[in-house]
Amino acid sequence: MDNKFLSKKGALSELLKALRDVSAADRPKVGARANEAKTKLEAALVAKRDGFENEALASRLEKERVDFTLPARRAPVGSLHPVTKITAEIVAIFRRLGFELAEGPEIETEFNNFDALNMREDHPARDMQDTFYVQSEKGGRLLRTHTSPVQIRSMLAKKKPPVRILCPGAVFRSDYDMTHSPMFHQVEGLYVDRDVSFAELRGALLFFAREMFGAQTQIRLRPSYFPFVEPGAEVDVTCVLCKGKGCRVCKDTGWLEILGGGMVHPKVFEAVGYGTGENPEPVTGFAFGMGVERIAMLKYGVPDLRLLFENDVRFLKQFGV
Ligand code: PHE
């Protein structure tokens, strides 16, 4: 932008040029005035420019104002799946009774999943309709239908009692409806030593039931059949909703079935070589297995198994961290 007063062709230059025409006597005085005017103008210009700059800065600071008192944006926090939570709770309870964590693969041999557990070739669970078989060069592989093969693995690995293990894990059955999913979770327990009794099984399960469902909980053992235990039992707890009075959830019985268990069958010990050969000492033991989803449904009052598999965050969020 052209400067009307201070540029080369501005009013001030013209004035200074005109000094030539002023008489020698007057020149110093006029010159001094002209310089004075120049200084003033320049000062005024600087002052104005500074003023504009300050204004611009002030308005920018105003516009870009940052409120340091605003709360920080929170990182989204996930929550544990109810099945994960219940599994951890079950494990924690049995750890206090001295059970150690054990693991086994989801793809199993027929031997570990069935034969060694006294489930012979003609057992209905071995039917293709119930079991997912997988192609394998080694032959006879399947997706484990329960966590019980980990009993076999643990005893074979330990070679010698005592064995006191707990195994949580996914299991698979060709089943799908309101209360069955083709994949679900179980926790297996096994305790083998000299003179392990049925009373100890009951004691361990009562302790578990009370830790899981509350101190007033009672348990009931009903005779039942599993090929790998003898005697075998299904175990009920007093209904979590009506506390035993009878309601819709327990179908007016006051009881809810939560697991199966029993004393390890001699055929199972035979299959892993306990009580013979290198380990001639007689052993006894108990085993139990429970469905994690079922316990989660009972504990949290989840009406439909499928809610546990749909992964709708609105549902999952309710279970907290
Ligand atoms: N494996 C059995 C099932 O899946 C449960 C069970 C385990 C029963 C151990 C007795 C002893 O139904």
Image (cartoon, helix red, strand yellow):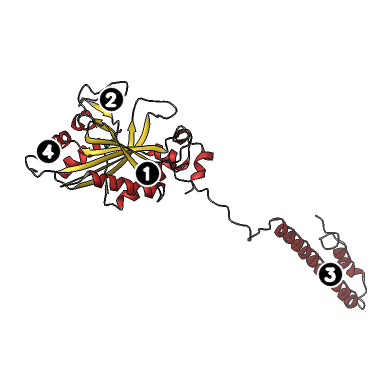
- Badge 4 local density, few (<14 within 10 Å), some, or many (20+)? some
**Pointer 4 residue:** 273
Mark 1 and mark 4: Cα distance apart in space: 31 Å
Q: Residue at x 25, y 40 (%)?
A: 287
Instruction: Pick the quarter of the image with the N terminus.
Output: bottom right
Q: Quarter of the image holding residue 225?
A: top left
Tell me: residue 199, above or below residue 172: below
Residue projecting furthest to the front: 245
Which is nearer the eye, 66 or 55? Answer: 66
Q: Amino acid at mark 3?
A: Lys
Mark 2 and mark 4: Cα distance apart in space: 25 Å
Q: Residue at x 28, y 25 (%)?
A: 125
Element marked by disc 2:
helix
x and y percentages locating residue 51 in the rendered image = 78, 64
Q: Amino acid at mark 2?
A: Ala
Q: Quadrant of ligand 1?
A: top left
Mark 2, mark 3: which one is toward the viewer? 2
> Taking 258 as reference, is 283 left or right?
left
Q: Residue at x 92, y 72 (%)?
A: 22
> Taking 13 as reference, is 294 left or right?
left
N-terminal of the pair, mark 3 or mark 4, is 3
**Pointer 2 residue:** 125
N-terminal of the pair, mark 2 or mark 4, is 2
**Pointer 1 residue:** 87
Label for residue 38?
A: 3
